[in-house]
Every structure is written in C-alpha cells, then in structure tokens.
C-alpha cells in the first residue's frame, strides 16, 4: 500500500487518469525524450559507481548469468502460451514473446526507487544485468519466428545495429562504464544533477508514461481478453521465477526483488524497434499495447509490491 | 521569367527504424536529394499510432519526399519493390511542376 502511494506511482496514475478522461494534458515530446535519457544516464552512472565501490563480486556474475538465462528462456514459454491461449500466429507470437524476454528500463528505475525508499536498495550491478537482458530475447524471438513462419526480407546490418547499438543500450552501458571509471569521488561533483533531482524528474516522466500507456490502451484494437490476461499472467509467473532464481543464487532481498522485476517486465523501447525491422508483419499495435499498456502499469502498481513480498518470503 | 519542368513527387511513409535502409536504396537508385518530415500520428489497418519519443522505434514514422524526373522515379519504385509488401510502406507518386527562374 505504501508503494502505491509513492509520488512516482501517483504521478503515473495521474497521467493515466488524464488520458482516460480525454484531457489535453501532454508532456512535450522533446522533454519526454530528454527525461528518458536523463533517467537512463543517472541510473547507469549510479550503478557503475556502486560497482566501482564494491568491486566485481561473485554475486554480480551469478546475477548476470541468471538474468541472461531468464532473458533467453522466457520467450519460449511465452511463445507457446501466446500460440495456444492467445491464438496468435507464429510471427506475432514470436514478436510478443521477445518483448517479454527483454526488460523495461523504466519499470526497473521505478522499482529501484521504490525499493530504495523502502530501505531495500538493490545492488548497483543490477544495472549491468539490466543491460545484459535487453537483447538476447530479440535473438530468441527471431529464432522462434524463423522456425515457425516463412520470413523473407532481412536487413541484417540494420537489425544488428538496432539490436546492439539501440540508444537505450548504449546510454545505459556507457554511463555504467563512466560510473565505473569515475567512482565515488568522480561522481560527487555531478551528483546534484544526477542524484538530487532524480526522484522529481522520475515523477514527471512517470506522468508522461501514464499518459502514454493509457492512450495505447484506448487505441488498441486487436487486444482480446485472452491476450489481456496473458499480459498480466506473464509478469506474475516470470516475476516469481526471477525472485526464486534470486533466492537460489543467494542474492539479498532488494536484489532478488530487482531480478524479479526485470524478469517480469516487458520491453517497449529496444525490442519494438528491432521487431519492426526483423518481423514487419507482426502487429506493432499489439505488442506495444500488451507490453506498454497492460504489463507496464500492472508491474508499476501491483507487480513491484508483489515481487518485493515474494522476495521477502523466499530469501 | 520562370520556367516549369514536369517531375514526379514520390512520398513514402516509412517506419523510423527502416529509414537508413530507405536512404541507402534511394541513393542506389540515383536519388540525390530528399526531405524528411516528422509525423504526429495516424490511423490505419492496425489501429491508431502515436509518434511518441519514448517508444520511438516502433511507433515513429517519417515522411520521405523526393522530387525527381520520370526515369528516376521508375528506378526508385523498382528498388523499393521488395519493401512494399513486407513493410507495408505507403508510397504515393504524383505529377508536379518544378518552378525555377530562367537565368
């Protein structure tokens, strides 16, 4: 209940309510883009600084291996469910499955903030795990699509660029590396920008995300009841598996919750762009509606407290 | 004194991730000049789309406009053929007059 009343969530709810009420409230697009760049830069820097402080621990490598495994395996289960329960064709099922294997940076940032406020800050190396989990699911998604549907035109160079050099991946890993290099001492002079204003700017960004998610939902035409249910069941199952894996790997409660959040989240930045290139026949309105309009709000409001509770029970 | 020369105007609504590929194909077809315009959103077979900067890659579409002679237009449409069905490009071609000052 406490996390539901955090400013981050309340601003998200305000954005969603405004969109549902057909208000003309809007965050200017360039500001929205700038906020997302700022947040990714700040979270990457902070993660790098924490790892510079604590060093490369066994837990870091275990969490990275666990995250990679989740990102590779989740799309297989999601694909089967989407085919059998969601009644999607192979191309759409593969595209949606890739989104659920990958991760949502914003869900992670919001979760990180909520956990930190609750005194359960995840380990800084989870930023590296987040970056590692962005792309493997894209490759698995394409493998599933190739095995199950006839694909023709493939602009491989563009796809590779979109997958590995996607702006969010570059900024996250780049700022993480800068944080590693500069360490705590180097971070102090820039902390007023990247630390002091962080929560306030996150609130503003979440307002825009609320608007975006609700408008996506209002405009989604191909969502069936089965797909809506899957978009809620996927994060619950994946989040539970993530938490269980964190507990098996003996990660602390906050870090286990973060692994659960990453497993439960669905990408709506890196994967959609790659899917538009690689699987153009897949319906972008469908995979964006599922990941952004249903799974993202679910994770932000109910999922994060649920994974936090599960982690407390399992660790 | 002005002169007007008949040309073809080709307009292509393209997904932002595919823009690099389109530029490359246009260049191969001999297109040396074009203009890119951002979009706000629209509606179509797959529902309404919004050009938001956050999910940038999938939702974003760009209008690529070029004005070329009839032979150049035919070359461009020919290299675009593989993309037309696969990517659902919306391509329009229209007759225009390019006005310039007689020197």
Image (tube, rainbow, N blue to C red):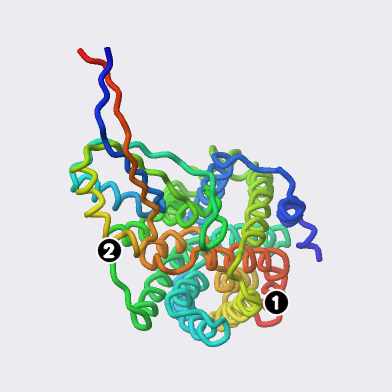
In the image, residue B41 above or below residue B85: above
Of labels 2 and 1, earlier in sequence is 2
Residue B91 lies, in percent from the top left, at: 36, 50
Which of discs 2 and 1 lies nearer the camera? The answer is: 2
Residue B13 lies, in percent from the top left, at: 41, 49
Label 1 chain ID: A
Indicate which disc residue A156 carries: 2
Q: Quadrant of the C terminus of chain A?
A: bottom right
Q: Quadrant of the N terminus of chain A?
A: bottom right
SS label for mark 1: helix
Which residue matches tag 1? A312
In the image, residue A303 above or below residue A3: below
Labelled pair 2, 1 in contact (Cβ < 8 Å): no
A242, A148: nearer the viewer: A148
C-alpha separation, residue under disc 2 versus residue under disc 1 = 44 Å
In this rendering, does residue A188 appear at all? no
């Amino acid at each position: 209940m406490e996390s539901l009343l955090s400013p981050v969530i309340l601003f998200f709810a305000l954005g969603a309510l405004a969109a549902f009420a057909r208000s003309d409230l809007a965050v200017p697009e360039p500001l929205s883009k700038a906020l997302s760049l700022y947040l990714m830069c700040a979270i990457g820097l902070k993660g790098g600084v924490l790892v510079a402080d604590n060093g490369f621990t066994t837990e870091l490598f275990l969490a990275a291996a666990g995250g990679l495994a989740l990102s590779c395996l989740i799309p297989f289960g999601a694909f089967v469910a989407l085919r059998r329960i969601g009644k999607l064709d192979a191309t759409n099922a593969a595209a949606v499955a890739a989104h659920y294997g990958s991760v949502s940076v914003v869900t992670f940032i919001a979760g990180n903030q909520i956990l930190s406020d609750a005194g359960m800050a995840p380990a800084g190396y989870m930023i590296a795990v987040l970056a590692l989990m962005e792309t493997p699911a894209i490759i698995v998604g394409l493998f599933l699509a190739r095995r199950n549907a006839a694909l023709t035109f493939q602009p491989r160079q563009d796809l590779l660029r979109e997958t590995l050099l996607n702006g969010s991946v570059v900024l996250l890993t780049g700022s993480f590396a800068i944080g590693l290099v500069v360490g705590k001492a180097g971070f102090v002079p820039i902390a007023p920008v990247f630390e002091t204003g962080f929560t306030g700017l996150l609130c503003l960004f979440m307002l825009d995300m609320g608007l975006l998610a609700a408008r996506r939902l209002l405009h989604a035409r191909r969502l069936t009841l089965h797909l809506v249910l899957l978009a809620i069941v996927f994060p619950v199952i994946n989040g539970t598996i993530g938490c269980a894996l964190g507990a098996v790997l003996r990660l602390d409660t906050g870090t286990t919750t973060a692994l659960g959040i990453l497993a439960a989240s669905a990408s709506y930045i890196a994967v959609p762009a790659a899917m538009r290139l690689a699987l153009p026949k897949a319906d972008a309105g469908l995979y964006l509606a599922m990941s952004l309009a249903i799974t993202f709000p679910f994770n932000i409001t109910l999922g994060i407290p649920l994974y936090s509770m599960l982690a407390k029970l399992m660790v | 004194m002005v002169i007007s020369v008949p040309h073809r105007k080709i307009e292509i609504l393209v997904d932002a991730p595919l823009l690099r590929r389109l530029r490359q194909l246009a260049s191969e077809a001999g297109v040396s000049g074009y203009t890119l315009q951002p979009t706000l959103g629209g509606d179509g077979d797959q529902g309404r789309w919004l050009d938001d900067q956050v999910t940038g890659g999938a939702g974003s579409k760009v209008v690529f406009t070029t004005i070329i002679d009839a032979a150049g237009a035919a070359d461009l449409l020919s290299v675009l053929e593989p993309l037309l069905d696969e990517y659902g490009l919306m391509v329009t071609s229209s007759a225009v007059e390019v006005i310039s000052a007689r020197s």
